[in-house]
Image (tube, rainbow, N blue to C red):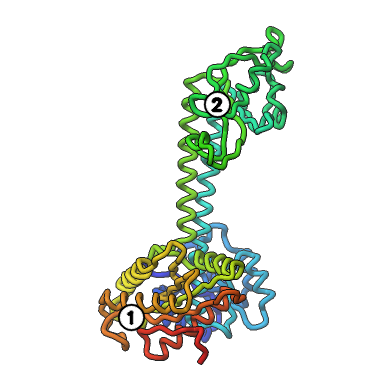
Amino acid sequence: MEEKLKVLVIEDDEVDRMSIRRLLHSSNLDVKIEEAEFIKEALQKLKGSSYHCILLDNGLPDGTGIDFLDQLSSENKAPIIILTGGGDELLAVQLLKSGAADYIRKDQMSSNVLEGSILRAVKFFDLEERSRLAEEELIKREAEFRTILAAVPDIILKMDSSQNITFINQAVNFLGFEPEHLMGKSIKQLLGPDTNNDLLPQLTTKRIGPRSTSNLEISFYVNKKSMFYSSMKSVQVLIDSKGLWSVPDEEVLQKDNEKQFLGTLLIAKNLTEQKKVENELRESQTKLKESNAILEKLSNQDGLTGIANRYCFDQFIAREVKRAHRDKTIISLVMIDIDFFKKFNDRYGHQAGDECLKKVAKVLNDSLKRPSDLVARFGGEEFAVVLPGADSLGASTFAERVRVAIEDVAIKHEDNEASENVTISLGFYTANSGENATPEIMIKNADVALYKAKNDGRNRSANGNLKV
């Protein structure tokens, strides 16, 4: 995040406020802190300013965390982290249910804990906001689509594979039918008395493209409720009918392709209006796919480095560890930390720090040799690499290769006690075939190895499988 992280601290105890300020300033966060001692004062500040995050003491002179959440305006756009005393876990759960993003016990508070909680809260709050906006856009487009269908004078209906109607638009009203009364009914309910049963396979066709049914003239019944019933019992309509499949049209005719027949799209139509509806449907589908692709990318990609984020890492390693246990295969995890990165930020600034993170992430990502591997930003200046199928030797070889590659980039770091350039320390751990490892165990063991590498002088790797 290029702008300062604006944090509102709501705490009546001066000693606790000083402690929070100290911890925030000693973290890797670039923060601007504002403070309030009372709920009333905090609510007033929220009316005039916006914040990236709120740190809220649960016990204030004029109320509790619940009181604050109850009085908070629905327009508040900042995640709230509750600060509690020991033994208040049940109360914290209640606060989380009431809308808080996280809680931290004061006796367990540290700069790392605060930094991690704030980054997670801000990231997930931002993701939820993007998801909400995307959902609103999809709802808006669906309403527009339904408005278009309601205005189309031609009957549009969809049948399932059993020839039952699963969708029909309001245009069927002119025949005296209500769409909801036809849902689930056979298409035969609409077919007029002069419709030859031999035409049914053409109506419920499985064909696509030029082989599908077009310009077929048949009759539809007119219901007694229609104003036309007194003068006619059926009307002639021009039918286009197309099969719907679980694969694109060009793959339907391929014999070796697995596919499922979903039903039929049938249109009793004015050709001009039909083209308009098709264009609207195509545009809506394209925009829906684009929105889904953007949302998926946001939920899995680290915004700064462009590699996988922590959420994606957690999902990936859980899946791969489970797969390795099931298939009795090996899997390795490498934890990576940039040496003396805080000193780098202090000397060169956070913008240079961000550029350093991007370069390190690119080197790590470019070092992957297989599509089954994953590199992710674990948090701050820490990265993680999952290597399914790699044994301890493979993990060691990878670690040494990327360690050298990072040093070869030659990013100047005058405060690095291990080198004149930016370096990394690495810890790796391998879960052997048949071992009932968990992601938590792998992370813990690789992290222990990482700290050993750092304690041994940094710019090196350590094997978490070797017990010291």
Which circle, 2 or 1, is nearer the viewer?
A: 1
Rendered image quadrant of residue 432 = bottom right
Label 2, label 1: how far apart the Cα atoms are: 65 Å
Q: Nearer the viewer, residue 289 or 150?
A: 289
User: Which of pointers 2 and 1 lies earlier in the amino acid sequence?
Assistant: 2
Element marked by disc 2: helix
Q: Where is residue 332 in the image (x, y as percent from the top left)?
A: 49, 74
Mark 2: few, some, or many residues within 10 Å (few <14, many ≥20)? few
Rendered image quadrant of residue 371 = bottom left
Q: What residue appears at the point 64 percent right and 32 percent down from the top-left corner?
A: 167
Q: If the image is split into quadrants, where does the N terminus sit?
A: bottom left
| Left or right of 83, for residue 355 | left
Indicate the amino acid at tag 1: Thr
Q: What residue appears at the point 35 percent right and 66 percent down from the top-left corner?
A: 366
- Above or below 99: residue 154: above
| Left or right of 168, for residue 419 | left
Q: In the drawing, what numbered circle is on residue 151?
A: 2
Q: Position of residue 364 (x, y in %)?
A: 37, 70
Residue 119 shows in this picture? no
| Left or right of 462, for residue 240 | right
| Residue at which label 1 appears | 423
- The mark tally for this picture is 2
Mark 1: few, some, or many residues within 10 Å (few <14, many ≥20)? many
